Image (cartoon, rainbow, N blue to C red):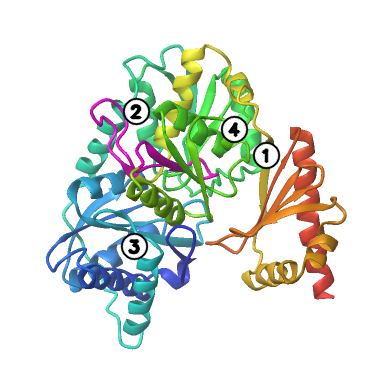
Amino acid sequence: MKFGTSGLRGLVVDLKGRASALYAQAFARHLIETGAAKTGDRILVGWDFRPSSPDIAATCIGALVRAGLSPINCGALPTPALAFYSLKQRSASLMVTGSHIPADRNGIKFYRPDGEIGKQDEAGITAIAAELNKADVDATPDEAPDHSAKARSLFLDRNRSLLSPGALAGLKIGVYQHSTVARDLLVEVLRGYGADIVALGWSDEFIPVDTEAVSEETIALLQGWAQEHQLDAIVSADGDGDRPLVADETGVPLRGDLLGLITAQFLGAQVVVTPVTSNSGIEKAGSFTVIRTKVGSPFVIAGMSEALAAGETGVMGFEANGGVLTASEFGGGGALAPLPTRDSFLPILAVLSLAAQQKMPLSNVAASFALPHAAADRLENFPVETSAALMAHLRASDDNLAAFLAPLGTVASKSDIDGLRVTLADCRIIHLRPSGNAPEMRCYVEAATAQDAEALLGKGLNLIRAWVDHEQR
């Protein structure tokens, strides 16, 4: 078990039972020791639709009871809905979810009463877990009072206040439901604004949809549905509903960082915090100040907190996957309360609202921003040891990096904020980065055209494969 870019992750066979009880107990003790909670305080528990999640949640509930806290069952709901209810209740919470990763893996996301935990909290929880691991751990599951309807209602109210009544009237929108825990709420919210909704792809089995690197199979589904139903857009989310997916009228997904940019303009943001993997054109696309961070919501949250501490207002953030976080109040009289964790609903509504206002196809709306063309993909089942060895080799010397990238061009500059982000002499960008929460090697690229970006992405992934093949000989 290990913490990644957002929460604890591991194989289901490793997480179920003892490990989930261990980390739930460690979280409870960390909350009490740091003064974020006291014995008897409520702690909220939610989960996604993957098969292992309800059992893991029940185990966590039992461990939290034995640790002296009072768990509340919030049921299957989107992570941002749980986090928002947690903030309103001023209670800590945990969400059992593996987000977009396959069903044989799962994880836990942790929230203090004031929001998502940071890297210091992760270190504290890990240290306590290591101590507790030396003794027996009771993994007996338990039940808790049900507040699922209250949590769901509060999140619905938040999203029903974002746009004016009938704001999406005239739009025919497909909702790719698959197994995302956001599927029913998305339909309800969008239909409430007057959109004509077509529900698509509902699944009993868990489908791992990665909104940052949408698979060819998923794109084929989106394109087929867009043509069959003559849709203006298709929307969806990942497993726990904190990362949005928005496809245009042809079924082509919009980049997550474009969704974030549109949301920043929708909110009238003054400061935007986003990881280094987000499009390099963000800085030129608005009047806001841009702060770049490492990949992962804890780093974005830390950047937003620093901006607030410096006296900034209108502070929000987003990740390259499109998940939007708000640190300030937005809207007249603070109509939109802060939600400093990833949310898929706000960017979906911001983008669809813009398309409705401009009365033009979503593809044209996206093209009007004229951002450099970007693409991303990853090599799955890529051992962590292998990615570490590759990155160590490339960082060892400029000559190693230059030789590795020689088939693509000449290195002009590099950034090592998180992974290696290299600008080539012809201004193309290639960024190599091991995933922080899964055995995957990710590659991000930018180029002048979509065709050039896809070509560069393919060559970049092939260079990684070739290096591995060479090392294994």
- Gap in angstroms between the C-alphas marked 2 and 4: 36 Å
- Gap in angstroms between the C-alphas marked 1 and 2: 32 Å
- Gap in angstroms between the C-alphas marked 2 and 3: 28 Å
Q: Quadrant of residue 338?
A: top left
- Gap in angstroms between the C-alphas marked 3 and 4: 47 Å
- Above-or-below relation of 15 to 111: below
Q: Which residue is mark 2?
A: 188
- Gap in angstroms between the C-alphas marked 4 and 1: 16 Å
* Of the two numbered discs 2 and 3 in the rendering, the one whose residue sits closer to the viewer: 2
Q: Which residue is mark 1?
A: 374
Q: Earlier in the sequence, mark 4 or mark 1?
A: 4
Query: How many residues crowd around disc 1 within 10 Å: few (fewer than 14), some, or many (20 or more)?
Result: many
- Gap in angstroms between the C-alphas marked 3 and 1: 39 Å
- The amino acid pointed to by label 3 is Asp
- The amino acid pointed to by label 1 is Ala
SS class of the residue under badge 3?
helix
Image coords of residue 187 (percent x, y): 39, 29
Q: Which residue is mark 3?
A: 55
* Of the two numbered discs 3 and 1 in the rendering, the one whose residue sits closer to the viewer: 1
SS class of the residue under badge 4?
helix
Q: Earlier in the sequence, mark 3 or mark 1?
A: 3
Q: Is residue 50 visible?
A: no
Image coords of residue 163 (percent x, y): 34, 22
Q: Earlier in the sequence, mark 1 or mark 2?
A: 2
Q: Which mark is residue 284?
A: 4
Q: Residue drawn 35% across and 34% down? A: 185
Question: Start and end of the magenta stretch?
Answer: 312-339
Image coords of residue 72 (percent x, y): 19, 55
Q: Quadrant of the C terminus?
A: bottom right
Q: Earlier in the sequence, mark 2 or mark 4?
A: 2
